[in-house]
Amino acid sequence: MKRKVFAMFLSSVLAVAMFAGCGSEEKKDSTADTGSSSQTSSDDGERAAADTTYGTAEEGKFVVGFDQEFPPMGFVDENGGYTGFDLELAEEVAKRLDLEFVAQPIAWDAKDMELSSGTIDCIWNGFTMTGREEDYTFSEPYLNNRQVFVVNENSDIQSAADLAGKIVEVQADSAAEAALNENTELSSAFTMQAVPDYNTAMMDLEQGAVDAIAMDEVVASYQITSRGSKFRVLDEEISSEEYAIGFLKGNDKLKESVEGALQEMADDGTLAKVSEEWFGSDITTFGK
């Protein structure tokens, strides 16, 4: 099914130019319940950041935190399992590091607590580096993405200027929200409201409750194709950014191990193959 969907998705990506807020496979055989951990004190957190090597990898696991409503990077499929482009890459990395892959869904606004408490080893979910470079230890970027506006196909809105006085939804704590908060010249012209996930935003747009959504172009193209919705993407971009894997600040050893596996995947063609299965072409940037 995913190959059929993403074959159509490729045409959307090429025509427009796939929303990382910034981004997995429930109850897969390889997925384990990690339980919950209490948040460490600031002193413990600093010590953990300094001493961390593999986190839960020391227990033979690679626990990847992701937003389960962020297709095509990580989401719940029609069978109730976790899937997505990022999660498929992460599972292959875990295999090459001889670790058990654990896809751990998280509340996106709680991602920092999950990472600092050790519940997850990394955030791998269309995670935007821009503006966060000092907050995490990031891998080398593996994908480029734009932030764009999505409107109904029959909308009179043809450009960002036409959004004046309109309502624009964003996912809370997403790259699009951050970009609009920075670009006050643009965002001051309309009312911006945040929702927990893009599925909610898409339903609001379909029902006419809002006039536009600001989101990742990768996610937008996927949503338009898979939902069969009559949406279109405005030509103007809000911003562009790079996707990377976010680790606890100072966890260079795990980052380097993961990058090593990704480099192997780039060298032997696995990275390109996974990208082609999801997007119809190799759109990755790692090692290039």
Image: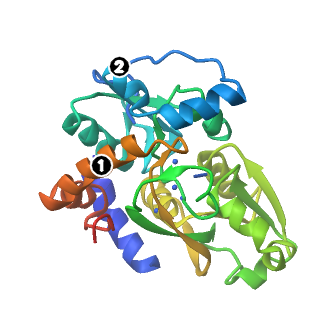
Q: Position of residue 79 (x, y in %)?
A: 36, 29
Q: Position of residue 272 (x, y in %)?
A: 21, 61
Q: Residue at x 68, y 84 (%)?
A: 159
Q: Residue at x 62, y 57 (%)?
A: 132
| Of 40 and 62, the residue lying toward us | 40
Q: Position of residue 125 (x, y in %)?
A: 47, 47
Q: Nearer the viewer, mark 1 or mark 2?
A: 2
Whether residue 107 can be seen here:
no
- Find disc 1 in the rendering and name its residue: 2
Question: Marks 1 and 2: CB-CB under 8 Å?
Answer: no
Q: In which quadrant is the C terminus drawn?
A: bottom left
What color scheme is it?
A: rainbow
Instruction: Using a 10 Å C-alpha cutoff, classify the residue at mark 1 as few (fewer than 14 neighbours), some (14 to 19) or many (20 or more).
Output: some
Residue 259 has which mark?
Answer: none
Secondary element type, mark 2? helix
Q: Residue at x 40, y 71 (%)?
A: 13
C-alpha distance separating marks 1 and 2: 33 Å
- Find disc 2 in the rendering and name its residue: 59
Q: Residue at x 44, y 58 (%)?
A: 222
Q: Position of residue 102 (x, y in %)?
A: 37, 27
* Residue type, mark 1 in image: Lys
As drawn, 146 above or below 156 = above
Q: Earlier in the sequence, mark 1 or mark 2?
A: 1
Whether residue 133 can be seen here:
yes
| Of 93 and 206, the residue lying toward us | 93
* Residue type, mark 2 in image: Glu
Secondary element type, mark 1? helix
As drawn, 104 above or below 226 = above
The image quadrant of residue 75 is top left
As drawn, 189 above or below 257 = below
Question: In this image, 141 relative to 40: left or right?
Answer: left
